[in-house]
Every structure is written in structure tokens, then in C-alpha cells.
Image (cartoon, grey):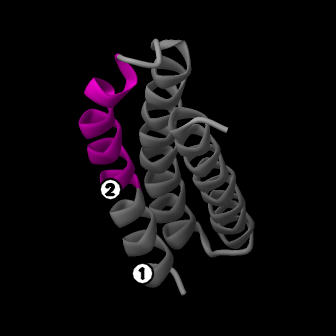
């Protein structure tokens, strides 16, 4: 397995984990009172938008050549860090 393939798998696993966390937030939102539900839904929409951006970055990586993927790595890691921070903030806020 190449370094690129290993990196892709790592990122895909993280996306899958984020999907599960967002699903947990959705479940909590369904059981929340009206005001709290609005807060949940706003944050979930924000997280889903960030996740879509991260997913697009992963697709760019998959389409990149073995030589060019390293150039994309910094942008990908920035998107991943933003998503990770936002998700951690949301999950701690809505515990």
C-alpha cells in the first residue's frame, strides 16, 4: 500500500467516525425541546457543510496523482482540523 492510499484510508475512517457523531447529535436533537432543537439543527447543518467540504477534499486527493497529492495535504489537513474542532465543540456543548 502506498503512502497516498494509507492516507486516504485514514481520512475516510475519520469521515466515517464524524458521520456517526453527527448521527448521535441528530438523535439528541430529536429528543430535545423546541429551543434546544433549533440550536442542535443549526450546529448540525454547520457540521454537515464542513463535512461535505472535507469529503470534497478527500475526493480531490483520490483524483490526484501520486506526485501531486502531497501538495494537497496541507489544505486537507486544515479542513480536517476545522471539522474536528467544530465537532468536538458541538459534542461537548450538547452533552
Q: What's the magenta region?
A: 68-83
What is the x, y in percent for residue 53?
43, 31
Between label 2 and label 1, give the one nearer the viewer.
2
51, 74: nearer the viewer: 74
Q: Image point 68% across, 60% down: which residue?
A: 26
Please give the count of numbered marks on the rendered protein: 2
How would you rate the neighbour count of disc 1 (Cα within 10 Å): few for under 14, some for 14-19, many for 20 or more? Answer: few
Q: Image point 65% across, 66% down: which residue?
A: 29
In the figure, residue 67 lies in which quadrant?
top left
What is the x, y in percent for residue 87?
45, 64
49, 69: nearer the viewer: 69
Give how far apart the Cα atoms at labels 2 and 1 are: 18 Å
In the figure, residue 39 lies in which quadrant?
bottom left
In reply to whether residue 92 is colored magenta, the answer given is: no
User: Which residue lies under the disc numbered 2?
Assistant: 81
What is the x, y in percent for residue 75?
26, 34
User: Which residue lies under the disc numbered 1?
Assistant: 93
Amino acid at each position: 500500500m502506498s503512502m497516498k492510499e494509507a492516507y486516504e484510508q485514514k481520512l475516510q475512517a475519520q469521515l466515517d467516525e464524524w458521520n456517526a457523531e453527527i448521527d448521535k447529535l441528530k438523535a439528541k436533537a430529536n429528543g430535545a425541546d423546541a429551543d434546544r432543537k433549533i440550536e442542535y439543527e443549526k450546529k448540525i447543518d454547520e457540521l454537515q457543510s464542513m463535512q461535505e467540504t472535507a469529503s470534497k477534499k478527500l475526493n480531490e486527493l483520490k483524483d490526484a496523482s501520486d506526485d501531486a497529492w502531497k501538495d494537497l495535504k496541507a489544505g486537507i489537513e486544515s479542513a480536517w482540523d476545522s471539522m474536528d474542532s467544530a465537532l468536538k465543540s458541538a459534542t461537548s456543548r450538547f452533552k
